[in-house]
Image (cartoon, helix red, strand yellow):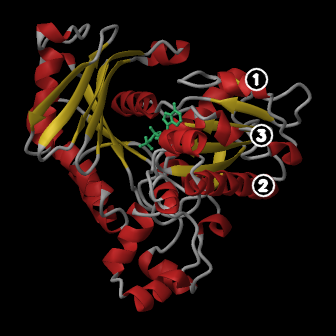
Amino acid sequence: MNILVLNCGSSSLKFQVIATDLEAIERDEDRMLARGVLERIGTEALITLRAEGRAPVRDAVPLRDHRAALDHVLHWLVSPDSGVPGISSLSDIHAVGHRIVHGGERLTRSLLIDDAAIEQIAECIELAPLHNPANLKGIQSARQVFGSGIPQAAVFDTSFHSTMPPESFLYALPYQLYVRHRVRRYGFHGTSHRYVAYRYRQLSGHDYEGTNIITLHLGNGCSACAIRKGASIDTSMGMTPAEGLVMGTRSGDLDPSVLEFLHHKEGMSFDELDSLINKRSGLLGVSGLTNDMRDLLAEEKEHEDRRARLAVELFCLRVRKYIGAYLARMNGADAVVFTGGIGGNTPHSRGPRAPRLGILGAQPDEERNRGLVGGREGEFGAEGSRIRLFVIPTNEELLIARDTLRCVLGVPRRW
Ligand code: ADP
């Protein structure tokens, strides 16, 4: 089955086409036929499209909205020039899988999309006002193009964390606020944490019950997850993705009274405060330069920029604190797994100066650590390290494709 995986952001659309079936899943032989990114939708969009085994094609095309972006992708996919194997007409796409950011408390499993599901996803808009509307645009666009002819599935970022117990997901606020408004921690990046836990099982030989690990998704957004017996029991993001680790532009954990203080001192409105903690803080806010870890490390090295260094230090210290907290939370873990653009590419964020994991019972081997960049997967713990250390590049699209297949076939998910 050829599955189109769509991940729609407010002004972006990322996609992959993945050929998979139950046998391919069993043998880990799913095949990515094409992928691409369309950014700055609404203006002159920047487009990168890539067929399997071919060089990427880059272009800039005015695209009005997500529907226009999807039309552009489909037109390319079916055109003979694109060279996408096995796709020559729309009928070669058999299902669509959508990444949906927020499923709230009720949408805890991947599901086939019908009118009721759309309504429920729309109900979660107040919990994810930036993300869910964009995700819904992706669903509506695909419905318009494909009609009811092909099934569509929704895979939620929050669902992996639905196994968290109340002592993890509740805030220490009056309980009625949870009852009345569902103010609680939901967690995000669930598909990524779930994928790396799955790969960890493949690499380590552990089974589901034996999966006791801490996973760290360190990208532009960052989150940590405590996984015990294969299930998420705690995660660092909260009701929204603003909580937890230091991120590209988000502050992560913050004394909530700072917001009221700034409201009085700087006359900032709620919207401005929201933008402050989500878009102007984190690596960008501390460094005053950029949210890009690559550039910060270069600034620090080449110009000894003090604030670039401070931003990196803050980032790494918060990672270390969460690892320590989760080791206590879980009564110890067998492994710590790093993923995401930063986790997968910066030995720095996993190494000696940064998390100083030795004291926690995890001793990195620096040479192995330095070698794990650019999408490489592997282990970098030193001989005798009590806790194993891994870099596992994430692959959320693959899980979305597999979940979509299972939803279509009505096969329950095994992991
Ligand atoms: P997103 O959360 O948007 O998916 P990514 O997972 O791609 O983001 O992570 C983006 C972050 O990863 C940026 O801070 C970027 O600088 C960092 N990054 C990507 N590649 C490298 C690299 N080779 N070295 C250091 N940092 C990198």
Whichever of labels 3 and 2 marks the residue nearer the N terminus, that label is 2
Return the x and y of residue 54 as percentages of the image width and height. Answer: 30, 9
Give the residue at x 59% y 66%: 169
The alpha-carbon separation of the residues under discs 3 and 2 comes to 15 Å
Comparing 368 with 15, the one in front is 368
Q: Residues within 10 Å of mark 1 (few under 14, many from 20)?
A: few
Residue tagged 1? 367
Q: Residues within 10 Å of mark 2 (few under 14, many from 20)?
A: some
Amino acid type, residue under disc 2 in the picture: Gly
Reply above or below: 213 against 50. below
Query: Mark 3: is the Cβ under 8 angstroms from ligand 1?
Result: no
Residue tagged 2? 324
- Locate the N terminus and report the quarter of the image it occupies: top left
Residue tagged 3? 352
Is residue 148 visible in this depiction of the protein?
no
Q: On residue 29, which mark appears?
A: none
Amino acid type, residue under disc 1 in the picture: Glu
Reply above or below: 46 against 17. below
The alpha-carbon separation of the residues under discs 1 and 2 comes to 24 Å
Return the x and y of residue 116 as percentages of the image width and height. Answer: 25, 55
The alpha-carbon separation of the residues under discs 1 and 3 comes to 11 Å
Which tag is nearer the camera, tag 3 or tag 2? 3
Give the residue at x 92% y 29%: 384
Comparing 11 with 292, the one in front is 292
Is residue 319 visible in this depiction of the protein?
yes
- Locate the C terminus and report the quarter of the image it occupies: top right
Return the x and y of residue 121 as percentages of the image width and height. Answer: 30, 56
Amino acid type, residue under disc 3 in the picture: Pro
Q: Looking at the image, which residue sits at the far front?
A: 303
- In the image, taking residue 135 as reference, residue 233 lies left or right, namely right
Q: Secondary structure at mark 1?
A: helix
